[in-house]
Amino acid sequence: MQQIVMEKYVEDMETELYPVTLMKYILNKKKIMRYFSNAANPEFKKKSDITVDHKDCKICKEKEKDGILCRQHTSIHRVLNAKKVAMDTDTGVLFYKNEIYKMSGNNLVLIYCPHTKLLKGDITDEKVRKINPLTISDEKLELPKYEIVEFSSALLMSTMCKCWFNDDYSIVSIPSENGADWAITSNK
């Protein structure tokens, strides 16, 4: 079976996107699509009250001395200030750095993908697939007009994809009936 090396695939896109973000999308596509679908439902209830503006964020205030924002506001700032992003032509989902996102009604659903190099302890399915969703509701919120680089998730989902996992291993996606499974291979 053909194998796509994600680092090369992303490099060819010429956009700021981390290969592991695409890998997390492949591994979690059904779950991620449910987040978008749920947020479009008028009955949807957000789990947090985070807003686009970080001025009232307690964690951002604590990190102000370091010149950084909290994790959530870093992601929000990134997607609202990006110039060139990747887009899955099969779903309309957008990608920039560690973020996977899409507007669903008046909601910006943003999924932050922590890098696998941050994993501590045993390598488990839950840790490898870990993503952090965030929903921001704002009737006035609009995404910028990006320069778009297109790709097809259907192609990635039907092919084995490989990307760097940590110093010791690479992760390989394995197409399956339920989406994608994964395995790790040695880098040494």
Image: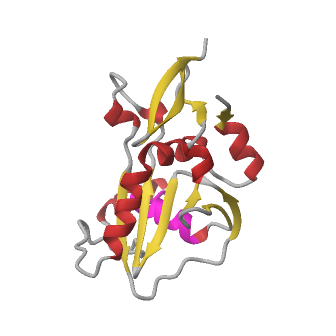
Q: Residue 115 at what x, y percent from top left?
A: 48, 39
Front one among 162 and 158: 158
Q: Is residue 15 left or right of residue 62?
A: right
Q: Taking 72 as reference, is 147 above or below it?
A: below
Q: Is residue 105 left or right of residue 4?
A: left
Q: Is residue 160 above or below residue 150?
A: above
Q: Quadrant of the N terminus?
A: top right
Q: Residue at image x 62%, y 62%?
A: 87
**Most extreme residue toward the bottom, as rendered?**
140
Which residue is painted at 36% across and 57% down in the image? Answer: 133
Query: Would you say 40 lies left or right of 48 here?
Result: right
Q: Say whether residue 34 is visible.
A: yes
Question: Range of the magenta residues?
Answer: 68-80
Q: Residue 142: within the magenta? A: no
Left or right of 117, for residue 121: left
Q: Position of residue 12 (x, y in %)?
A: 77, 47
Residue 95: image location, x then y, percent: 57, 58
How many discs mark residues in the rendered view?
0
Residue 81's image quarter? bottom right
The answer to whether any part of residue 168 appears in the image is no
Q: How did the renderer colour the structure?
A: secondary structure
Our reading of the magenta stretch's main secondary structure is helix
Q: Is residue 69 magenta?
A: yes
Residue farthest along the top direction in this orientation: 188
Q: Residue at image x 46%, y 34%? A: 116
Quadrant, the C terminus: top right
